[in-house]
Amino acid sequence: MSTLLALLTGLIFAAGIYLILCGNFLRLIFGLGLASNAVNLVIFTAGGLSARRPPLIAAGQTVPTEPVANALPQAMILTAIVIGFAIITFVLALFYRHQRTEAAAAEEGRR
Amino acid sequence: MNTLILKVASRLMVGLILIFAIYLLLRGHHSPGGGFAAALVAGTGFVLYFIAEGTAPVRRTLRVHPASVAGLGLLTALTAGLLGPLSGRPFLTGLWLSAGNTALGAIELGTPLLFDVGVFLAVLGAILTVLLALEEF
Amino acid sequence: MILLYLPILLPLATASLMVMPALPHRLRYPTALTGSLAQLAVTLLLLQGVLDAGILSAQTGNWPAPFGITLVADLLSAAMVVITALMGLAVILYAQPAVARAGGGPLAFAHVLLAAICGAFLTGDLFNLYVWFEVMLMASFALMTGGRGWRAVKGLTAYVVLNLLATLCFLMAIGLLYGLTGTLNLAHLHLQLALVDGDATVTAVAMLLIFAFGIKAALFPLYHWLPAAYPQLPIYTAALFAGLLTKVGVYSLLRVTTLLFAAHQAAILPLLLVSAALSMLLGVLGAAAQGDVRRILSYHIISQVGYMALGIALFTPLALAATIVYLLHHIVVKTNLFLIAGLMRHLGGAYQLERLGGLYAKSGLLATGFLVAALSLAGIPPLSGFWAKLLVIRSTLDAGHLSLALLALAVGLLTLYSMTKIWQAAFWHPAASPPAGTAPGAATLWMGAPVALLALITIFFGLGIEPIFQFATHAAEQLVHPQIYVKTVLGG
């Protein structure tokens, strides 16, 4: 399973880097999104794969009764997803503003 | 988007979504949920509202500027953290105040809830500031 | 230890007050200024605390290390937060004429940036460091685009993309380190990494981290984003970035090479040495070819970062002390030079050398300020830069790298050449065309005061080098022997 995920990570990374190097702004953003997801997969895989229960403690208990999955890599991935998502949103907004300004400038030029 | 179906549906949906957001916020410490998820859900409620009705009614309904909500949220979260040092414990220590058993079940109030409310307001304010600005641009 | 949190919390609180439209317009600038003064005060208290009691640490939320988020202040961290707060104050004073009418919106993000930089200096946890890097990145995006035209977006693309790649690599290194050791607390990592056998994985992680911090610090060959982005920024933003952002990269390099990879240096240090030497050389050569004050100064950041990385690469106690002296000196001088560039634009009407002229006749004080900062950057005694360069060159000679010492000397001379070029064109020669700048006024006073303050610090830094060198030696001792750091964090 780890090997499969490692190969998948490599594939997604390669696709991300390819898109970043395309020289097109929109592809660059998609490439960054792909690459950041590949990194999340790295954390997930490196944190250790296990088929266990989610780390939730039943009502009335203070410790989990069965072996649970390690919550920390997931918390890190969650943080990374949130931050990555915010940055992708920012870059998209930047792109959008840029396009609008360019279009307005082109309009100005035609007049 | 000016369609009758969306307008009618959004009136029902927005209220439900916001109640669901509050539910997520309040159950968040011991169960899945929490301030961040709740704020995103509440954000979708407002987004649905301005897709149906435009941004001006949303700003009117909010009464305060969303950036103020974000600032207030951050200050609330900081206050929740500072209650620890004020009682001689490290920053962000969870302090609990049990309100005992009521008809609704055991109610526990603590600084994690205050912190979550701060996160909720900060995230909601920030995403509304951004989304409204983008929609109006 | 609430004192460890206040340098981060105060600017965050200031920023959250300032983003509220409910805050009256006339109170915005005073809020920013008060927040900055308060931050400086608490950082000075923190420095005093570290000087009195040694390394301080705090466990957030009462979670014991290594499970919670730890904040640590050793001498290096404490000095860095003091200098960060000082630069924040200087830039906020300087920006008064530019932002007073706009209501001080950009200053809110400047405070977020200051909080994030202090967070990066104080954290004792690698994942927390990543979070502060991201906060820094977001705040810098907001500062770059806020209150400006959108034409500059193209020049900023390289900054955005390379910094994102840097954080991705940083994150990947964090994931691999966690898989390897099961911890991300820096002190705990120090103990755990020493037990790991399998040099290859550790070296791979180290390379990822050096790549990430190398982009942040603008080291060869990862520096191209810097001269493309900084000249596009509003000048007070550029001054804040130029002084502090690359130095967070240098600080992080210093931290991980001493704390994490002390046992795996054979693979890291030669690489850093080559990268440092080429950064020094190519940065200064790049600057020599430029005709815009901001571009010249941007290229000089690269060459100066090279000196600091050289100190890290040599890795003797003296070399690390030299790096620390260099860091402190360089932050003050480089911020000041960018502030002076803004004043040159204010009084002379341009950033391009061919359009500037006659500034010496216009303002002798500005000329003096420029001379102090520029000669210090080039390393003329008795200013701060002389001692910083002397220490780096001395440790290079001690390590037996004669050619590197000669290179460092030559780069100093070339720096002097660039500074002379600015002096000749902008200050000494009369202006070719009638200058377009404004006459000195109230705005000049706001902008001139921090320049004078930083110039005075540069002079006193140079004259009082002995206690500063002692301080840097102690700080370097703490870095070379991390046992006390580890013990303070983990207890026992």
Image (tube, rainbow, N blue to C red):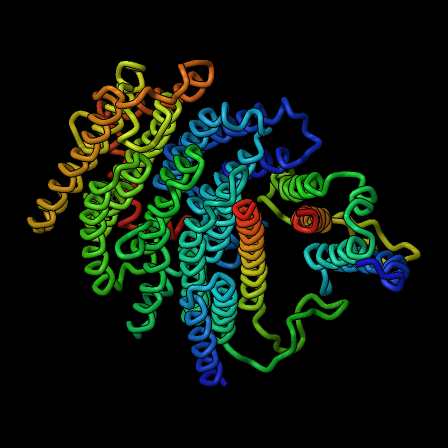
Name the residue located 63 percent from the left edge and 37 percent from the top edge. C19
Whole-percent x and y of residue C180?
41, 71
Tell which of A45 and C193 is nearer to you: A45
Residue C63 visible in rendering: no
Name the residue located 55 percent from the left edge and 25 percent from the top edge. C100
Tell which of C464 and C327 is nearer to you: C327
Residue C267 visible in rendering: yes
Residue A50 occupies which quadrant of the picture? Answer: bottom right
Whole-percent x and y of residue C57?
46, 45
Name the residue located 72 percent from the left edge and 62 percent from the top edge. B33
Q: Residue most toward the right? A: B103
Name the residue located 40 percent from the left edge and 65 percent from the top edge. C173
Whole-percent x and y of residue C276?
22, 52
Tell which of B76 and C92 is nearer to you: C92
Whole-percent x and y of residue A24?
46, 64
Where B130 falls versus B4 (above or below)? above
Residue A22 occupies which quadrant of the picture? Answer: bottom left
Q: Is residue C237 left or right of residue B110?
A: left
Q: Total of numbered circles in the picture?
A: 0
Q: Is residue A88 left or right of residue C329?
A: right
Q: Is residue C95 left or right of residue C224?
A: right
Where C235 falls versus C34 (above or below)? below
Tell which of C432 and B92 is nearer to you: C432
Residue B56 occupies which quadrant of the picture? Answer: top right
